[in-house]
Image (cartoon, rainbow, N blue to C red):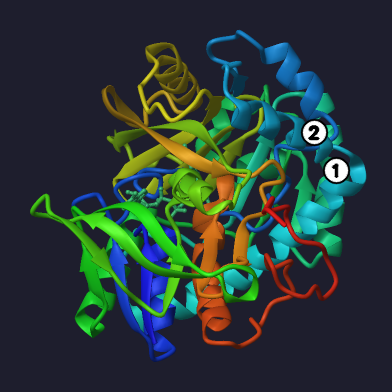
């Protein structure tokens, strides 16, 4: 079959790779100059199966209220006169009950674990070099109550098969000696030895190159403006995509199947077809520092619970990422937020990096209220979704790509997950609002 994939972040690129492997003729349409130029460019770089707790959890509503209007808050909801944002917020609240949270964690762990295994196999097969480390993820706490609150989550992860061990402060510093200066402030942590980290941009662009060499057509500088469709009910299908190509010309491209992997921008592309995805852009920041003293910089990937920052060592660079602002599609950098990241990183590792010339970046996480992505079918029989991977798109990316290739090929994916628009195995699907 001829398959068109829309978007070449980690999700679209992994989808294209596995679709090609399944024997399809694949074209990827991407408006940027290359793969992984948007949200998959400079994220936190953690493959974090064991930290699958969604932001929507029982403690979230109070925290979000407390943080309202606080410029450097980890999660900042800026109210806008925008229906999607309000609707998203209402659904977010609904996902905060204990039972929904547990349900969502199960979903996320299932696809994330499958994805990590897929990524490991892909790494062995392709030999892509992406500064990856398999030294685990260490989450440390500086607030006693937050540490206490993390214990049930760690227990649930263990029940789900993730070896996330709750540990004391001494063990935190033993696992990552670069945290020694913080010893007195750390109250505990949890460590998952099987988690990983690595540069999502290097991996995605490397995979795109390998896929291109294998015969996938990547059309960069190509903006999709509209999906064309015909028929209704069971006969509804997408017939083509309207694009503006790299020469500025309008064209229509046809294919047998279409995979939507445009991250946050999947929403406006699908709305005219009556598919209302609950995805809202969650702007996050990162700072990348040059490591000047390798011994003083961490080499285990870290999560700083108090500041909601993740920290990954990428060769001779240190990537620190976090914070979320729900404020439309802007990627503007807020200097207060940038300065807060550098202040905290310098406090943690004063001698590790050059803090005078950080590379700041902002990207839009395609957030569903539950953080469970849409992977699967739509009511258009040849239109598929692989979008809404929120805070964990790098963690879920390889597996989501492999699963959608199975679905497009008419096979059942090898993972028990609530695929959109498909019969359930054990769990229920994220909500897609479509006209009757
Ligand atoms: C600060 C931050 C830290 C993060 N840290 C982590 C982490 O540690 N671990 C983790 O697992 N995840 C992390 N994430 C989340 C992860 O980065 C995202 O979930 C993931 O990158 C989403 O990938 P994607 O392919 O869906 O979207 P994108 O990478 O945004 O790709 C979508 C592509 O579609 C293209 N596109 C959009 N519209 C059109 C159009 N009309 N025509 C043509 N092309 C179009 C875009 O140009 C883009 O390249 C983080 C995110 C942020 C912002």
- CB within 8 Å, label 1 to label 2: yes
Q: Residue at 50% of width from left, 41% of height from top? A: 365
| Left or right: residue 317 compared with residue 57 | left
> What is the residue that sits farthest to the top in this orientation?
69
Q: Residue at 80% of width from left, 37% of height from top? A: 57
Asked which secondary structure carries label 2, the reply is helix
| Residue 199 visible in the current orientation | no
Vertically, is 430 above or below 368? below
Q: Residue 251 versus residue 46: which sits nearer the camera?
A: 251
| Residue 392 visible in the current orientation | yes
Task: Find residue 422 and report its horizontal and vertical position in percent.
Answer: 71, 73
Q: Residue 384 versus residue 301: which sits nearer the camera?
A: 384
Mark 2 nearby-residue class (10 Å; few <14, some 14–19, many ≥20): many
Give the number of the disc on residue 147.
Answer: 2
Give the number of the disc on residue 264.
Answer: none
Task: Find residue 104 and report its horizontal and vertical position in percent.
Answer: 78, 53
Asked which secondary structure carries label 1, the reply is helix
Vertically, is 40 above or below 256? above
| Circle 1 residue | 151
Is the shortest distance between ligand 1 and the CB of mark 2 under 8 Å?
no
Image label count: 2
Which image quadrant for residue 296? Answer: top left
Task: Find residue 44 and report its horizontal and vertical position in percent.
Answer: 47, 43
């Amino acid at each position: 079959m001829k398959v068109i994939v829309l978007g070449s972040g980690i999700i679209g690129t992994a989808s294209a790779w596995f679709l090609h492997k399944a024997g399809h003729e694949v074209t990827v349409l991407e408006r940027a100059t290359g793969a992984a130029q948007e949200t998959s460019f400079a994220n936190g770089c953690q493959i974090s199966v064991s930290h699958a707790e969604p932001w929507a959890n029982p403690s979230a509503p109070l925290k979000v209220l407390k943080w309202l209007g606080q410029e450097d808050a980890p999660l900042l909801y800026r109210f806008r006169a925008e229906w999607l944002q309000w609707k998203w917020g209402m659904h977010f609240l609904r996902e905060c009950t204990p039972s929904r949270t547990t349900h969502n964690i199960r979903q996320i762990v299932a696809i994330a674990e499958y994805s990590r295994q897929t990524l490991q196999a892909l790494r062995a097969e392709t030999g892509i070099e992406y500064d990856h480390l398999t030294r685990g993820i260490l989450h440390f706490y500086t607030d006693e109550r937050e540490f206490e609150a993390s214990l049930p989550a760690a227990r649930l992860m263990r029940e789900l098969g993730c070896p996330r061990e709750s540990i004391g402060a001494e063990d935190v510093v033993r696992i990552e000696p670069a945290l020694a200066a913080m010893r007195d402030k750390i109250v505990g942590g949890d460590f998952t030895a099987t988690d990983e980290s690595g540069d999502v941009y290097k991996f995605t662009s490397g995979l795109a190159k390998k896929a291109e060499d294998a015969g996938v057509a990547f059309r960069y500088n190509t903006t999709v403006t509209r999906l064309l469709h015909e028929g209704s009910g069971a006969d509804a299908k997408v017939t083509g995509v309207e694009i503006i190509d790299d020469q500025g010309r309008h064209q229509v491209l046809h294919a047998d199947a279409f995979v939507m992997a445009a991250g946050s921008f999947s929403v406006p592309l699908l709305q005219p077809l009556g598919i209302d995805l609950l995805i809202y852009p969650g702007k996050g920041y990162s700072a990348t520092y040059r490591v000047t003293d390798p011994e003083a910089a961490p080499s285990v990937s870290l999560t700083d619970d108090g500041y909601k920052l993740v920290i990954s060592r990428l060769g001779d660079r240190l990537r620190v990422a976090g914070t979320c602002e729900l404020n439309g599609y802007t990627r503007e950098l807020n200097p207060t937020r940038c300065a807060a990241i550098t202040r905290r990183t310098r406090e943690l590792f004063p001698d590790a990096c050059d803090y005078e010339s950080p590379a700041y970046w902002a990207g839009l996480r395609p957030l569903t209220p539950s953080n469970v992505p849409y992977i699967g079918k739509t009511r258009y029989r040849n239109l598929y979704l692989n979008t809404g991977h929120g805070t964990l798109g790098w963690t879920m990316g390889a597996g989501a790509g492999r699963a959608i290739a199975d679905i497009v090929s008419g096979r059942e994916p090898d993972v028990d997950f609530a695929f959109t628009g498909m019969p359930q195995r054990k769990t229920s699907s994220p909500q897609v609002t479509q006209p009757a």
